[in-house]
Image (tube, rainbow, N blue to C red):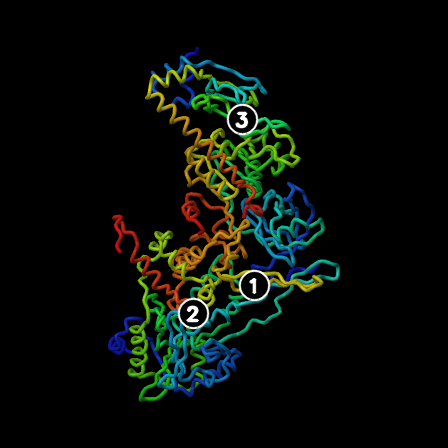
Amino acid sequence: MTAQAASAAGDAARPPESAEVIKADALEDLLDGLGRRGYTVVGPTVADGAIVYDELTSVADLPRGWTDEQSPGRYRLARREDEAWFGYAVGPHSWKRYLLPPTHTAWSAERTADGGMRILDDPSPVPRYAFVGVRSCELAAIAVQDRVFIRGPFADTVYARRRDEVLLVAVNCGDPAGTCFCASMGTGPRATTGFDLALTELLDDEGHRFVVEVGTAAGRALLDDVTHRAAEQRDVAAAVDITDRAAQRMGRQMDVTGIRELLYDNLEHPRWDDVASRCLACGNCTLACPTCFCTSVTDVTDLAGERIERQRAWDSCFTLDFTYTAGAPVRGTTRSRYRQWMTHKLATWIDQFGSSGCVGCGRCITWCPVGIDITEEVAAIRGTEPDESGENET
Amino acid sequence: MMTSHLLALHPFVADLTSEQIVTLSTCATAVRFAPGALIFREGETADACYLVRAGQVALQLHAPDGPLVVETLTGEHVLGWSWLVPPHRWRFDAVAVDDVDAISLDAGCLRRLLGDDPALHAVVSRQLLAIVSDRLEHTRVRLLDVYGHHHAAGV
Amino acid sequence: MLPVSEAVAATPLAPRLTHVDRVERETADTVTLHVSAVDTELPPFAPGQFDMLSALGVGEVPISVSGDPDDRVTRQYTIRAVGAVTRALTSLRPGGVMGVRGPYGHPWPVEAAVGADVVVVAGGLGLAPLRPAIHHLLAHRDRYGRISILYGARSPDELLFADEMQRWQSDVDVAVTVDAPSAPGKAIPPWDGRVGVVTTLIPDALFDPHRATALVCGPEVMMRFTARALADQGVTGERVYVSLERSMACGVGLCGHCQLGPFFVCVDGPVLRHGLVGPWLAVREL
């Protein structure tokens, strides 16, 4: 892509250094190439009235011609006017379910012949996944979880081993949902880093095709296996236009200026009571969130006590048990649990991991059964923060 | 009767002027209690305020199966404020646990001085109120039985 | 017994197996377990660090190490039976198997405290996480100024390490107080010591408030009152350290349970400077 093309497209973000084009048909070859390399291909597919992530056997599994309509507490599939394969925003699933499965065995032990115990090897091989259709916000979410699970003082081996093997084929977002706000969070809609390949789906007069950017040598090798051509200026311009227009059509926005201080200064804001009166403490937001990482463990034994498994499962800070300490939960009220979730996501996360824990994907808004909107909650606190002079800005 | 110098060393009079200390010393006597000595007894007339200089005192109540210690006081402290509040009767027993050195301020003398000098009354009352609120806080914390709430071993 | 395989040892969540060598009863509901590793030695710990202890088949809990940090063979844990896991752990008998992984967390600042007075304030079971620090202070007695150990417990029968405390007294100042010297229906050894909250010991303790370091462990309420009493004496929050307790499922900063504002108690604590953590502790239900 040329500098002129970039400026013509008005794209202030990093323009693709070089791009190529594959015809839509070639995506099948790309998936085959992944299969030949031993990858289990996971990508979007329609199931149970939603676009979820599951194993793909061919492009026929993709949600061709479907889109998603999202608003607080509401998600519906709808037919598109075109036959786009990636013409939706994001669904209830996120990639974390493949990098840290919702339930898994942390370790197991069995009784030895001499009556002792021994800790057993994890017998399960590390799966080798290729994620196809990763959104820019999701790349950001994976980067956030990398910081949690790999960059901390102790690496989570379950996550790290899977993550090492993953190949990421991003697909840029052209059709953000009503609950999306990645543009506010600086995490999208155009993928700029963290992918092996990044695709932009084009459906115009020149046919159904993908503009492909290469992020890594593995991505290059994969692309070289399929028929492709160098992108022309108009291909690139069209691709950039897709995400530029998407950035303009974000359903929501969040002002993140000084958000850490804003929340630290407002831990007793009356808005927490207000949101607590609506929140069901169901934990849907934490399960749908692509960065929420909390887990709990439970021991499971056979009846004879010969074998023990320590099972690990996703947990949610919305449960009462989550903070059970010294005979009582530390966060006994919904107010305190919602406050914990939101201040962690948007403020303490910055202290802990050097970035926000929110990528603006909007899942917590869509999948909240009562439609609590994190962007609205932040705005409400910001709008009614007691100002320095002691007067209220309301 | 004792010199005002000894009295001036006690933190209780830290906020008093040297004139007030001299005045107060007219009520003061140095006293000493041997271990086990009863300093005062529940129900008796509260006839003194003790500014303890050293030694441990146990405040206790008598029960059929023996004394119940309510609190022990050590170091420099003030023992007894029932002399200020009618009907001027001790509400607990005070027993010397070890050698107790104290300055005894005669209650009648003290009440007379405070009646004559509203400024002195204010300072002394404020001092006593601070002591009472500290002891009340300690008592309340103990009522919570906080140590029992600690599980495991620290973490 | 077979060694733990390398692959499993790589996961920070898998414990090493240990044998219980000895069980010491401390109080009615509290015991000290002496354990040693089945195959390899347990890595050394610093005073104030904790291990994750597994009652196999029941679960795992964080427990501060309560023994001597110079003892490289035996690890001690003082545990009160309060939940399913601690009940299982305190029911272990010599020869029993227990999982251990650790040590984790930030220790007491025994090095930073060198050259000045140290005030150790413990409440109830809070003496256990402080005991390794006391061992360290005693082992390096000449490096410190005055050392005061102030200990408060509910009643005389709930005092931990009472015999040991007698020995400590020859090198350091020890003051002990109880909330209740006697209790109805409870046979308690006669008590002629102090009665009152542990904070009442602070004004009588001898230390230079402008240089002394305070190590405080006990229930959160007790630590709050203690920090206030120390501040009254002139010890600022910058030199007051507390050991915090929060729900911990992993001990290694991965499970998210033990957060207190920006802190993960497991990796940023459990020992934290009160001046740093005090404002967060003051926020209710954080």
What residue sits right under mark 3 in the picture? B59
Q: Is residue A217 visible?
A: yes
Side of C135 relative to A225 (left or right): right
Q: Residue furthest top?
A: B1
- Between C194 and A241, the residue placed more toward the observer is C194
Are labels 3 and 1 on one chain? no
In the rendered image, the quadrant that contains the C terminus of chain A is bottom left
Residue A230 lies in quadrant: bottom left
Task: Find the distance from the CA under tag 3 to the CA under tag 2.
Answer: 63 Å
In the rendered image, the quadrant that contains the N terminus of chain A is bottom left
Q: What is the x, y in percent for residue A57?
A: 51, 83
Q: Residue furthest front?
A: B87
Local secondary structure at mark 2: loop
Q: Amino acid at mark 2?
A: Trp
Q: Chain of mark 1?
A: A
Q: Are marks 3 and 2 in contact (CB under 8 Å)?
A: no
Q: Is residue A164 visible?
A: no
Q: Are marks 3 and 1 in contact (CB under 8 Å)?
A: no
- Between C143 and A156, the residue placed more toward the observer is A156
Side of B105 relative to A157 (left or right): left
Are labels 3 and 2 on one chain? no
What residue sits right under mark 1 in the picture? A312
Q: Amino acid at mark 3?
A: Leu
Q: What is the x, y in percent for residue A326?
A: 54, 49
Residue plotted at (53% across, 74% down): A128
When the figure is inspected, residue B127 is found, relative to residue C161, above or below; the finding is: above
Q: Nearer the viewer, mark 2 or mark 1?
A: 2
What residue sits right under mark 2 in the picture? A367
Q: Chain of mark 3?
A: B
Residue A374 lies in quadrant: bottom left
Task: Find the distance from the CA under tag 3 to the CA under tag 1.
Answer: 55 Å
Sequence-wise, the earlier of marks 2 and 1 is: 1
